């Protein structure tokens, strides 16, 4: 759970340091949408196995890695 919060914190801090304060909100929204879609896919996958909880679907490592990768792509562009 802290890793996902850390990814969002890094995104905000780096965007502010780069001086693109006007781009922080749209970028955060895009990363949040990516996380929600990935969480939905993860939830459906966990449901098929019979062990689905919302916490497991949102805060699993595959979603955190996807959010970190999306953040990295925004930061290098």
Image (cartoon, grey):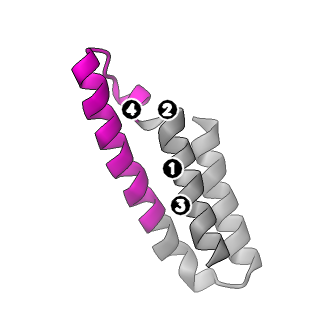
Residue indicated by mark 2: 60
Residue indicated by mark 4: 57
Tell me the quarter of the image containing the N terminus. Answer: top right
Q: Considering the numbered disc 3 on the image, is that residue within a helix, a strand or a loop?
A: helix
Q: How many angstroms separate mark 1 from mark 4 (CA)?
A: 13 Å
Q: Considering the numbered disc 2 on the image, is that residue within a helix, a strand or a loop?
A: loop
The answer to whether marks 2 and 4 mark residues whose Cβ atoms lie closer than 8 Å is yes
Q: Nearer the viewer, residue 54 or 74?
A: 74
Magenta region, residue range: 30-57
Residue indicated by mark 3: 70
Residue indicated by mark 1: 66
Q: How many angstroms separate mark 2 from mark 4 (CA)?
A: 6 Å
Q: Main secondary structure of the magenta part?
A: helix
The percent coordinates of residue 38 (x first, y second) are 37, 46
Mark 4 or mark 3, earlier in chain: 4
Q: Residue at x 54, y 43 (%)?
A: 64
């Amino acid at each position: 759970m802290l890793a996902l919060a850390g990814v969002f914190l890094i995104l905000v801090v780096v965007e502010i340091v780069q001086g693109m304060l006007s781009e922080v909100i749209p970028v955060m929204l895009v990363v949040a949408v990516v996380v929600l879609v990935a969480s939905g896919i993860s939830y459906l996958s966990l449901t098929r196995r019979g062990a689905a909880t919302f916490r497991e679907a949102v805060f699993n490592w595959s979603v955190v890695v996807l959010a970190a990768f999306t953040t990295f792509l925004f930061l290098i562009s």
